[in-house]
Image: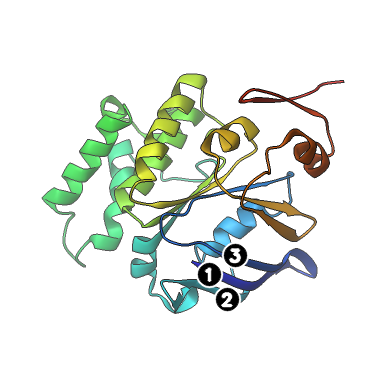
Amino acid sequence: MTVSDLSISYTDMAVLDNVNLTLHKNTHLSVLGANGSGKSTLAKALCGLIPYKGSIKIQGEELCDIPPKERAKLIAYIPAKMESFEQFTTVEDFVLLGRYPYKTSFKDYSKEDKTIVQDILEELYLKELGTHRLHELSSGQQQLVLIAQALAQKSKILIFDEPTSNLDPKNCVLFVKELQKLRHNHMTILITHDIQLASHLNDPVLFIHETKTNFHPTGFFDQEHLNLAYGVPFKKENTMIGIVYV
């Protein structure tokens, strides 16, 4: 993926300005920054969900020139929460929508599609919830279902937008284990406020501040650098990082 001179504005207000980034195969990235800095906006642009100025290329092809079904096979966006859904949609039906890019028009989903969905539900411990309707789930369970749908989509690039924000500690560990598996065959971009998680993954960091981006291949999680980047004191001991509340 190559991002060149990317700029995004809402009305007359610039959200991101002149973003440049190159990610190679088997590269992973953490995107950090303050609330409202433009992290989710960047993620949506990288998936072609919102208009942008500049260039985003995947495998050498301009994103806006790739047909939607083919684009879905290349890149998937997993939002921070489930925004809306049809009242009677079940977990199985929702996850099966991840197979839509592979579906033959006017035909039902294939046996292979349904097997893929069942395997993913089992892996994320969601199988017993398969026939439940989405509105019956907790916010944490809904987040896991969003992740399941993205896994069913089998896109080459996965963008996770604050995936652990609604998860309890047990499910956070489950998500990270699943993420580690995915990183063998997928490029991952993680948007998060969880400094400890980002440090654990130890990926290059794209830090967004006041419409500008700074790329840090290494060294972002040094204590002094964190203090400067966020404007609050951090404490780092061994591999543990925490905010100092004063």
Query: Which label was assigned to residue 28?
Result: none
Image quarter of residue 76: bottom left
Label 1 and label 3: CA atoms lie apart by 6 Å
Q: Residues within 10 Å of mark 2 (few under 14, many from 20)?
A: some
Residue 185 position, x and y percent, is 33, 50
Given residues 155 and 80, the one toward you in this image is: 155
Label 1, secondary structure: give it: strand
Q: Report the residue at 48% width, 29% height from top.
A: 140
Instruction: Say whether marks 1 and 3 touch (CB < 8 Å).
Output: yes
In this rendering, the answer to whether 121 lies above or below 240 is below
In the orientation shown, which residue stands out farthest toward the right?
246
Q: Earlier in the sequence, mark 3 or mark 2?
A: 3
Q: Residues within 10 Å of mark 1 (few under 14, many from 20)?
A: some
Please name which of the two marks, 3 or 2, marks the residue nearer to the observer.
Answer: 3
Q: Report the residue at 63% width, 57% height from top.
A: 41
Q: Amino acid at mark 1?
A: Thr
Residue 200 position, x and y percent, is 55, 33
Label 3 and label 2: CA atoms lie apart by 11 Å
Label 3, secondary structure: give it: strand
Q: Is residue 114 left or right of residue 203?
A: left
* Residue, disc 1: 2
Instruction: Say whether marks 1 and 2 touch (CB < 8 Å).
Output: yes
Please name which of the two marks, 1 or 2, marks the residue nearer to the observer.
Answer: 1
Q: Is residue 45 visible?
A: yes
Q: Earlier in the sequence, mark 1 or mark 2?
A: 1
Given residues 177 and 165, the one toward you in this image is: 177
Query: Which label was assigned to residue 55?
Result: 2
* Residue, disc 3: 21
Q: Is residue 198 left or right of residue 140?
A: right
Residue 134 position, x and y percent, is 40, 35
